[in-house]
Every structure is written in C-alpha cells, then in structure tokens.
C-alpha cells in the first residue's frame, strides 16, 4: 500500500490542533430500524464543514519553504477547495481553486470568503483540472489534488483512526465514495487496526466514476451529471496513481444510490438525527434506509459534510425536491 497505517498516524500528529476530533454518536432511530447498533461519525461538524480539512492540512504542513512561496492550486467540487483555502490562509500561502460550473454557488461563496482565487472552467472536474495543469506549468503553483495524493489520503485516514478508537467493535464502516481519497484513507486506517472490519463505499448512481472504474478494472472516464451528492461528482483521473488501486484492494463493496434515496438520507438526518448534511454526507444513511447494506454488527456511517445550499435543503426536507434538477424548480 502506498499509504499505510504508519503514514496515517504520522499525519494525525502533523495536523493535531488544526482539525477537530469529531464526535461519533449512536443513532437510536437507525439502530432500531436495523436491529444493530448504528453510529454516526459527525465529520460534518469539522471546522470547514467537511472531512477535507484533514487531508488539506496534512498536505500543506508537509510543504517545503520554497513550495509555500509558490502557492498551491487544486481542482475541487467545493469542499476540498474550501479546506485548502482555509489551511493555506492559516499558513499565509496563496491558494487558487479551479471548479466547474456545476459547483453550487454556496460553496463558491465560502471559498471566496477565505481569500482564495477562484477559476470557473467548463462543466466537469476534468475541465477544471486542465486549468490546474495550466497554472502549474505557467505560474509554478504547487498542485494539491483533492484525492490522488499520499498526503491527502493519509490526512483523510485520520478519520478512520478516530472511528476505531470511538467504536472499537465496529463491524462495518460506510464511507462516501468519489475520487477515493476518503475511502482509501479510511480503509487503510480501519483495516490496519482491525483487518476483519468491512469498509463499504457509497456513491450516487449518476456518474459514479470510481465504481465504473472498478467494474472496468482500470480508471475510466464517465459523464459528470447533476446530482444531490454534488461533492461526489467528477472523475478519478485516467492517470490515477493511488486511490484506484487502494479502493480496489481495500473496499469490500460499493453500493450506488438513486437520487430519491439520497434525498431520503438528507431528510432522515434532519428529521430524526437533527443534523443538516449535504447529499454526499447522507449517502450512508440513504444506503441503510434503502436496504442496500446488510448489517453484520455495529456499523459506523460517515456524515462527511454539511455544505448544502439551504434553499435546496428546505425543498428536500419538505418533500418538494428529490433530484438535483429540481434545485430551482
């Protein structure tokens, strides 16, 4: 494995004091529904509203003085950009975030408030990545990608360490799956501590690039489509170096959710758990509610982020929207 338990433990020491150790709480409603203990890892309570701060903080902390002087750049669907902007501002480093037109306005505003430069390019993560490549070549910025980077993966893996400390008898962890930085890091940590614990990736049915790549046996491109789980959009990169292989070797299963199942997860989080989560953060709940995961014992669901457009959230919890295309209907 390119990222091991040793790397993840080192990352935890590196980012100590820069990120929150988030709570892991028992869900009475989901435990009663499934007949087994279900715990919610409240990572959406993280400082920037999502898990991404862990990886960004670890990658920033590892930069040399020369690299810091050049500034950093990344493509993002929103949460990585916000985390990188936050971590860079704390260190006095310039940050440029490249995003497609599919990124919700609320996420753009949050990044702007942190002082990062924003470049909006095209209609996909692949388009945004081309702008990143241009800035690296022409301006010498240091690329810190959202997932396919050892420092990012190790930082995200610290979440897995916390889970195993908070619920030592965990039988399964449900982790939101996109480019695989969170899933591979958490899986490396969880299986490094408890090899028998299952790690299951959960994604949306619309444009699930990692699932399509795993099915094909190699990284493949998929069409990026509007989805309630917008943070899970984008490809994994045809030249993916790390996360594809780690997800292939470490994940026990991958399940996909329809848009109405994601919406059901958002509604349940709000109505039963009193938590506001974005679509990507609700996929674990949605998978349990849809019966797409078999319970084998204590299960932990990672609520990965809360950065949802609140107008859309209101429509979802009121039953007026069940797809991303109904955002402004």
Image (spheres, grey):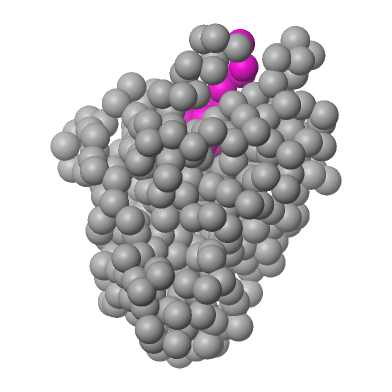
The extreme left residue here reads 216
* Image quadrant containing the C terminus: bottom left
Look at the image and tell me whether residue 13 can be seen. Answer: no
Q: Which residue is located at x 53 percent, y 87 percent?
A: 272
Dividing the picture into quarters, in which one does residue 62 lie? top right
* Left or right position of 35 against 72: left
Q: Which residue is located at x 82 percent, y 29 percent?
A: 92
Q: Which residue is located at x 67 percent, y 30 percent?
A: 95
Q: Which residue is located at x 36 percent, y 39 percent?
A: 124
Which residues, given as a range, are shown in magenta?
140-153
Q: Is residue 13 magenta?
A: no
Q: In the rendering, at what x and y percent does residue 208 appear?
A: 28, 49
The foreground one among 134 and 29 is 134
Q: In the rendering, at what x and y percent does residue 194 appear?
A: 50, 51
Q: How many marks?
A: 0
Q: Is residue 151 magenta?
A: yes
The foreground one among 325 and 266 is 325
Dividing the picture into quarters, in which one does residue 227 lie? bottom left
- In the image, residue 154 sits, relative to residue 224, either above or below, namely above
* Left or right position of 219 against 108: left
* Image quadrant containing the N terminus: top left
Q: In the rendering, at what x and y percent does residue 261 appear?
A: 32, 74
Look at the image and tell me whether residue 209 can be seen. Answer: yes
The foreground one among 86 and 226 is 226
- In the image, residue 124 sits, relative to residue 25, either above or below, namely above
Q: In the rendering, at what x and y percent does residue 202 appear?
A: 36, 58
- In the image, residue 29 sits, relative to residue 299, either above or below, namely below
The extreme front residue here reads 329
């Amino acid at each position: 494995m390119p990222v091991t338990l040793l790397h993840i433990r080192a990352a935890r020491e590196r980012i100590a004091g820069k990120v929150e150790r988030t709570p892991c709480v028992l869900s009475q409603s989901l435990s009663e529904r499934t007949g087994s203990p279900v715990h919610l890892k409240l990572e959406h309570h993280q400082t920037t509203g999502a898990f991404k701060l862990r990886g960004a903080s670890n990658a920033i902390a590892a930069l040399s003085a020369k690299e810091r002087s050049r500034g950093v750049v990344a493509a993002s669907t929103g949460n990585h950009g916000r985390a990188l902007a936050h971590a860079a501002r704390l260190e006095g480093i310039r940050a440029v975030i490249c995003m497609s037109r599919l990124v919700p306005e609320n996420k753009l505003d949050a990044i702007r408030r942190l002082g990062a430069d924003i470049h909006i390019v095209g209609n996909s993560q692949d388009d945004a990545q081309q702008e990143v490549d241009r800035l690296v070549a022409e301006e010498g910025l240091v690329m810190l990608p959202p997932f396919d980077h050892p420092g990012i993966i190790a930082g995200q893996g610290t979440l897995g360490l916390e889970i195993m400390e908070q619920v030592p008898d965990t039988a399964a962890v449900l982790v939101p799956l996109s480019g695989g930085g969170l899933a591979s890091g958490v899986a490396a940590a969880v299986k490094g501590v408890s090899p028998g614990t299952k790690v299951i990736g959960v994604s949306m049915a619309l444009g699930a690039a990692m699932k399509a790549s795993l099915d094909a046996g190699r990284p493949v491109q998929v069409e990026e489509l509007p989805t309630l789980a917008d943070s899970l959009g984008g490809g994994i990169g045809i030249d993916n170096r790390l996360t594809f292989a780690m997800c292939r070797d470490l994940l026990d299963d991958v399940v996909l959710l329809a848009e109405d199942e994601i919406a059901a997860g958002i509604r349940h989080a709000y109505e039963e758990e009193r938590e506001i989560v974005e679509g990507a953060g609700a996929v674990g709940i949605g998978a349990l509610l849809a019966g797409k995961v078999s319970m084998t014992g204590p299960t932990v669901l990672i609520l990965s982020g809360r950065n949802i457009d609140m107008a859309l959230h209101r429509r979802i919890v009121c039953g007026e929207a069940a797809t991303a295309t109904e955002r402004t209907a």
